[in-house]
Image (cartoon, grey):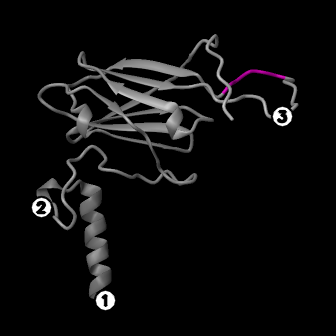
Amino acid sequence: MREQDDSAAPQVIPVKVYRGDGRITVASPMPGLEPEDIEVDVTHDNRIVLHGGLRGTLKGANRVVEDEWTPGPYHREYRLPDHVDGEMANVTYGNGVVVVALPVSDGTRPARLIPHRSGMARGEVTGNTGHPVRPFGERLNEAEKPADAQAMTERIERGLQR
């Protein structure tokens, strides 16, 4: 059961922002939350807003002895360096870190994004990672594949030929 304390001031969280081929990736720690506690918004004025709600802090009859950290609430707004397509973004949450992959576009399309759990303490990536979703079975041509995907495909194909 979750306890809410609306009087708690949000903790400002740090971000790491990466610029790669055709996408911007934003990563930020939000330890102690579940994906359903996190909201990510891409706004029309080219900002990303990361917000994590407060989780229950006491279990049963426990008494707080030291209180230097709480699992939320978290909040951060960041102006993105380029226009992005929020509707094609991908959000994952795992190991206490929310990661947002945003495809760069000609103009910003705002969106509210829903995080997906990325596995139990594995950090594996799920979803479309900021690339357009294709119908099942449709393959990317070689120019569309990221370098790491090309290398993985080659390793798999070499393994199948043995």
Residue drawn at point x = 57 percent, y = 16 percent: 10
Residue drawn at point x = 43 percent, y = 40 percent: 115
Q: Amino acid at mark 2?
A: Asn
Q: Is residue 92 above or below residue 158?
A: above
- The image quadrant of residue 50 is top left
Residue 149 in the image, given as x and y percentages of width and height: 27, 60
Distance from Cα at disc 2 to Cα at disc 1: 24 Å
Distance from Cα at disc 3 to Cα at disc 1: 58 Å
- The image quadrant of residue 142 is bottom left
Residue 123 in the image, given as x and y percentages of width and height: 49, 50
Say which label, 2 or 1, has the lower sequence index.
2
**SS at mark 2?**
loop
Say which label, 2 or 3, has the lower sequence index.
3
| Residue count near mark 3 (Cα–Cα under 10 Å), binned few <14, some 14–19, many ≥20 | few
Distance from Cα at disc 2 to Cα at disc 3: 56 Å
Q: Is residue 143 above or below residue 114?
A: below
| Residue count near mark 2 (Cα–Cα under 10 Å), binned few <14, some 14–19, many ≥20 | few
Q: Amino acid at mark 1?
A: Arg
**Residue placed under numbered mark 3 in the picture:** 60
Decide whether residue 52 is among the magenta residues. Answer: no
**Residue placed under numbered mark 2 in the picture:** 141
Residue drawn at point x = 40 percent, y = 29 percent: 40
- Write the start and end of the magenta stretch as one range: 66-70
Residue 162 numbered mark, or none: 1
The single residue placed furthest to the front in the displayed view is 1
Q: Amino acid at mark 3?
A: Gly
Proximity of marks 2 and 3: CB atoms separated by less than 8 Å: no
Residue 79 in the image, given as x and y percentages of width and height: 32, 18
Residue drawn at point x = 57 percent, y = 52 percent: 121
Q: Nearer the viewer, residue 143 or 87?
A: 87
Give the prevailing secondary structure in the magenta stretch: loop
